[in-house]
Image: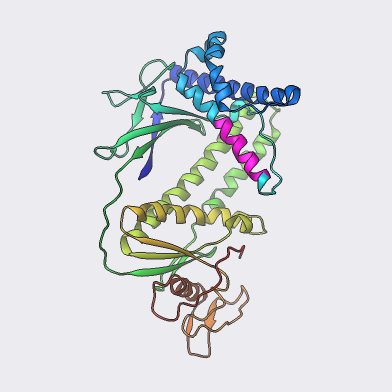
Amino acid sequence: MVLSYKFRLFTTAAQEVALTGMLGAFCDLYNAALQQRIEAYRRRGISLRYGNQAAELKAVREADERLAGYSFSAEQQVLRRLEKTFAAFFGRVKRGDRPGFPRFRPKARFDSADFRVGDGLTLRKSQKLGIVGIPGEIKVKWHRPLPDGTKLGAAVVSRKAGKWFVCFQIELPDAEPVEREFSPVGIDVGLTSLVALSTGETVPTPQFTTRAAKALRRTQRTVARRHRNSRRQRKAKARVARLSAHVANQRRDFSHKLSRKLVDEHSHIAFEDLNIKGLAAGMLAKSVHNAAWNQLVQHVQYKAASAGTVVALVDPRGTSQTCPECGTIKPKTLAQRTHRCECGCVLDRDVAAARVVLLRAGFGPGHGLQAPSQRVAA
């Protein structure tokens, strides 16, 4: 089992300048490697790979004093990042999509560097970080302890909204099977209620985006009024980034707490396998992004892996149109929020859909209400 633990870094002014310079040097290396691939194919028809460029990295470091001062393995990771970008590009081409060709990266948006713990990045006895090319030791806010006996693998140093973070990948032994009392639940996700449980409980969708909209709108207008690339515009852009990061943190915190509650209370959890990308491309895109259903499902899945909870994804088609008691189809418009059936079943529309989800997953009693397995937009 591999988990990620993310911690805040508190840097001095000199360390922040050095970290920014490191990311700038890595961005230049990324762009130079991309340019080399383009020119090699354009002039000689040669498709360069990671191995070809990694073999030249030692010579590049000898010619560039900036790169020579940073971790060799971290610079190898920059070349691997470019290799993954090209692999994803050709994969989309093979599937028949119309992907954009890999682009050159601006330094303002090159915000992370990959390291191997013990090679370029070390965890000192003082519980501070040491990074090759960065002066002194960097203070870490250990808001939670690392699990005992863990093996630290990769680490990512990142910058977001003017703050610095480190994210450790931690390898843990597979969790032992846990016997739990059978307590299944089906979950229907929505916009008015973030989740409706088959038990009848509903959780309203927090309106983090709506509450921050006024301040965000004012700050974005400030950015538009500033001279392009001026110091004052950069400061206004930083305020927009801080506001957006604050909303994202609120959403993530709520998702973590809700997913923990669901995993602790239920042994089997069933979700709809929604095509969220299709939903986010429509007129409700802003509300869909605010709900962050996929984030919630992912948080439940990784917490369930160590808690002995089973998570299933079922076909979402017709869940809100099907009666959970008799299985008949009862067409309803979006304005109809109550499910009524001739069999006597009267339920909240979302709760009824959650019970259908539970039955389709095979966790509840009844006929299963099976449907063809295919993802849909709604």
Classify 167 as above or below 298: above
Q: Quadrant of residue 167?
A: top left
- Quadrant (top left, top right, bottom left, bottom right) of the C terminus: bottom right
Query: Is 321 displayed left or right of 303 in the figure?
Result: right
Figure disc tally? 0
| Rendering quarter of residue 275 | bottom right
* Picture colour scheme: rainbow
Residue at horizontal 67 percent and vertical 58 percent from the top: 282
Residue 277: percent from left, percent from top: 61, 54
Residue at 36% across / 53% down in the picture?
303
Q: Is residue 60 magenta?
A: no
The secondary structure that dominates the magenta segment is: helix
| Above/below status of 5 relative to 133 | below
Query: Quick check: can you spot residue 207?
Result: no
Residue 91 falls in image quadrant: top right
Q: Quarter holding the N terminus?
A: top left
Nearest the viewer among 85 and 66 is: 85
- Residue 253, position as x, y percentages in the image: 42, 49
Q: Is residue 319 left or right of residue 260?
A: right
Q: Position of residue 88 (x, y in %)?
A: 60, 40
- Is any atom of residue 311 visible in this view? yes
**Which residues lie in the magenta part?**
81-93
The residue at the point 49 percent across, 90 percent down is 343
42, 104: nearer the viewer = 42
Residue 90 painted magenta: yes
